[in-house]
Image (spheres, rainbow, N blue to C red):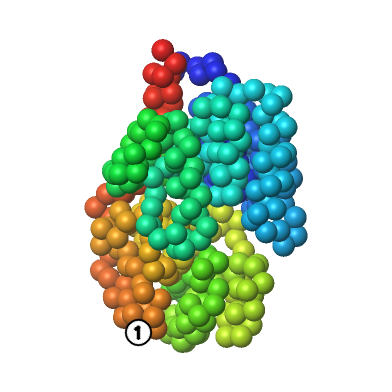
Amino acid sequence: MKQIENKECFILGTRPDVIKMAPLIYKIKPLIINTGQHKELADEALDIFKIKPHYNLELMKYNHDVISLISRGMHELNKIISIIEPKRIWVLGDTTTALIGAYVAYLNKIELVHVEAGLRSHDMNNPYPEEMFRTQIDMLSDILFAPTANAVKNLKREKVKGKIYKVGNTIVDALEMIKPSLSGVSPLNEKYVLFTMHRRESFDKDINTVFSIIKQLSSKIKIVFPAHLNPKVQEAVKKYQLETIKPLNYVDFLWYLKHCEYVMSDSGGIQEEVPSFNKPILILRKTTERQEILNSGLAYLTSLEEEDILNKIDIISNLSKEEYVRNPFGNGDSAQKIVNIINEIHK
């Protein structure tokens, strides 16, 4: 494979950033800047993939808010970018880190690459603030690597200025790297449902509705709930006296995912991971930017109303052991497709 010679700079800061960029990092060997947005979770993922950032901004502060993170992040990142003068800046997805990287790239007139471009829920409040973040990042990007045909359509509809390429999602590449290390023996001796919930837009009425249902469901089947440490989540856990476990490292989470009966979650990332393990998922959100998962036959979206959630649980718990006809997010060759495109651009 032809070696990429230009100075590529990857901006990371969250666990999903590291996981999804890891297959590309192995192939491109870029300069890596870690914002430290989610320090402990990102550090864990860096250890899994044996990745060492060249720069660490250490932006994470106790109970930090998004506005101060963006302000400090732009200031600190800009200082480093002015020194290293990269050829391109790469960001992933819709995180605050990605938005910071996009703004700094644009203001310094540096070519911006957006990996996982074009995802849309078409609702600025769901998910919040990510829908706004990714829309702005796409508008600023020069090269957009879209995971699916639907993402490409979104970008073309919005008439973004950059070049669009459909490449699949690098999460599939990353999971194929990790799956051989996962035990074939279940972590528990009983059947269980894997449950997570952490999104900001769910913190009021919705989290109470869902947690009440989880309490009822736990009398019928074991619920494995690695509870998020957010105070709002912890408060609701105590209110409904839910049994939880400590947050899992990524490899252990995938081990639990591999052996569960089905998943209930408001996570966007888990929607992308379940096809690789042929697991049904009940999406605890009113909208999803990953519409492809809904066409799989093993994913259901809820209105977050009690009756609808209970009906969907009944459906999903009685599904036959089908498999996804195909993984809607790719075949595990997304990183290579991206490298081939970048090398072609170099010619």
Q: Pick the residue in front: 3 or 124.
A: 124
Q: Amino acid at mark 1?
A: Glu
Say above or below: 338 vs 39: above
Say above or below: 110 vs 151: above
Q: Position of residue 74 (x, y in %)?
A: 67, 41
Q: Position of residue 115 (x, y in %)?
A: 46, 38
Q: State the image quarter where residue 161 is shown.
A: top left
Q: Secondary structure at mark 1?
A: helix
Residue positioned 42% across, 53% down in the render: 273
Outermost residue, top side: 347
Residue positioned 68% across, 34% down in the render: 78
Image quadrant in which the C terminus is located: top left
Q: Residues within 10 Å of mark 1 (few under 14, many from 20)?
A: few
Residue highlighted by disc 1:
307
Q: Is residue 41 left or right of residue 22?
A: right
Residue positioned 29% across, 60% down in the render: 294
Say above or below: 76 vs 70: above
